[in-house]
Image (cartoon, rainbow, N blue to C red):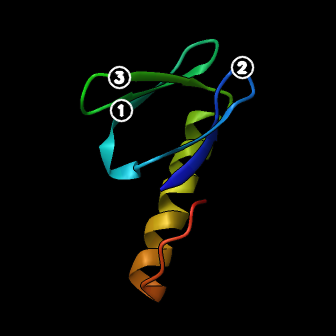
Amino acid sequence: MIKLTQVNGELIVINSDLISFVRAHPHTVVTLTNGDKLMVEETPDEVIQKVIRFKRNIYQNGEREAG
């Protein structure tokens, strides 16, 4: 799970395995595998880094922490 900030300032936590793709518009739009779209403040590169940190933590430490 990763923490992201919606454009209204609300913190959300999403399952990173459900991310289908990320697009950079004026805001970053994260599209999930079910078709839901989330507009977030983080850049696409920040979303990628959060996913990488989360997965690295799982594979190296076996822990599940939101990042």
Image height of 58 relative to 31, above or below: below
| Residue occupied by mark 3 | 36
| Residue occupied by mark 2 | 8
Q: CA distance from mark 3 to mark 1?
A: 11 Å
| Mark closest to the chain's N terminus, 3 or 1 | 1
Residue 26, given in percent of the width and then of the height, sits at: 64, 12
Q: Is residue 43 left or right of residue 37?
A: right
Residue 59, given in percent of the width and then of the height, sits at: 39, 80
Which three-letter amino acid code belongs to the residue tagged 3? Asp
- Front in this rendered view, residue 25 or 5: 5
Spot the residue most to the left.
Answer: 34
Q: Residue at x 35, y 22 (%)?
A: 36
| Mark closest to the chain's N terminus, 3 or 2 | 2
Q: Residue 31 lies in what quarter of the image?
A: top left
- Determine whether the residue tagged by mark 3 lies in a helix, strand or loop: loop
Q: CA distance from mark 3 to mark 2?
A: 17 Å
Which three-letter amino acid code belongs to the residue tagged 1? Phe
Which three-letter amino acid code belongs to the residue tagged 2? Asn
| Residue occupied by mark 1 | 21
Q: Residue at x 40, y 49 (%)?
A: 15
Q: Residue 60 lies in what quarter of the image?
A: bottom left
Q: Residue at x 50, y 65 (%)?
A: 54
Image height of 20 relative to 46, above or below: above
The 10 Å Cα crowd at callout 3, few under 14, some 14 to 19, many 20 or more, is: few
